[in-house]
């Protein structure tokens, strides 16, 4: 006899099967990983040697740091935010704003600094932001930011470094 509970569990199981483990783990499957090569490329061993464990998790495994954990969220000086993986300049401090999310947020990247891909993890579709030079995962972009772009580039602070301006 088919009960509502069995039917519900069957539908849930089928849906999770279609979604794959990505929805449960937050990890993208190989099919969703962009088949893109980047100017700055290292082997996994070289990345592990270059980055700290938490940086590797965010930049190379598409992880996320805890909100409020990055000192870069509170960074107010003039300067430039760079990729922690390859040192490419990503965001000017003039485009940074306090989004109240606990992650460093910007309304616009520097020209040709980032790329975007579709992220279908966690039961939603988001736009992932990665470094255009090394492909490192930086965060996501949302359309709820301030003028003039109305975009919010919500970045993992651990994926970036900050270099203050000479007269900051």
Image (cartoon, rainbow, N blue to C red):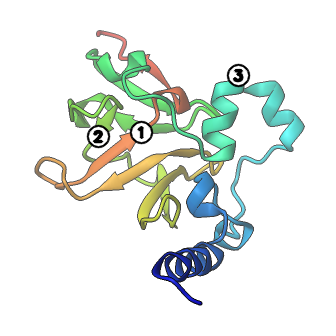
Q: Which residue is mark 3?
A: 52
Residue denoted by label 2: 106
Q: Which residue is identified by label 1?
A: 155
Between residues 14 and 92, which one lies in front from this camera angle? 14
Q: Position of residue 33 (x, y in %)?
A: 66, 65
Q: Is residue 159 left or right of residue 85?
A: left
Q: Residues within 10 Å of mark 3 (few under 14, many from 20)?
A: few
Farthest bottom residue in view: 1
Instruction: Give whichever of discs 3 and 1 has the lower sequence position.
Output: 3
Q: Residue at x 28, y 15 (%)?
A: 77
Q: Splitting the image into 4 quarters, where does residue 55 fall?
A: top right
Q: Looking at the image, which residue sits at the far top?
A: 167
| Front position in the image: 30 or 24 | 24
- Would you say 36 lies left or right of 115 here? right
Secondary element at tag 1: strand
* The residue positioned farthest toward the front in the image shown: 1
As helix, strand or loop, the secondary structure at mark 2 comes to: strand
- Alpha carbon distance from label 2 to label 3: 24 Å
The image shows residue 45 at horizontal and vertical percentages of 89, 36
């Amino acid at each position: 006899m088919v009960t509502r509970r069995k039917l519900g569990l069957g539908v849930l199981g089928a849906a999770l099967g279609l979604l794959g483990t990505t929805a449960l783990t937050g990890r993208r499957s190989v099919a969703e990983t962009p088949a893109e090569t980047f100017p700055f490329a290292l082997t996994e061993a070289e990345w592990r040697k270059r980055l700290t464990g938490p940086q590797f998790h965010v930049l190379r495994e598409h992880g996320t740091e805890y909100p409020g954990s990055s000192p870069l969220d509170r960074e107010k000086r003039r300067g430039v935010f760079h990729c922690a993986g390859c040192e490419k300049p990503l965001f000017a401090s003039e485009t940074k704003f306090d989004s109240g999310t606990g992650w460093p947020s910007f309304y616009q990247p520097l020209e040709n600094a980032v790329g975007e891909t579709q992220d279908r993890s966690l039961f939603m579709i988001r736009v992932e932001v990665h470094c255009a030079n090394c492909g490192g995962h930086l965060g996501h972009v949302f359309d709820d930011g301030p003028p003039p772009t109305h975009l919010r580039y919500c970045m993992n602070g651990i994926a970036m470094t900050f270099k203050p301006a000479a007269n900051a």
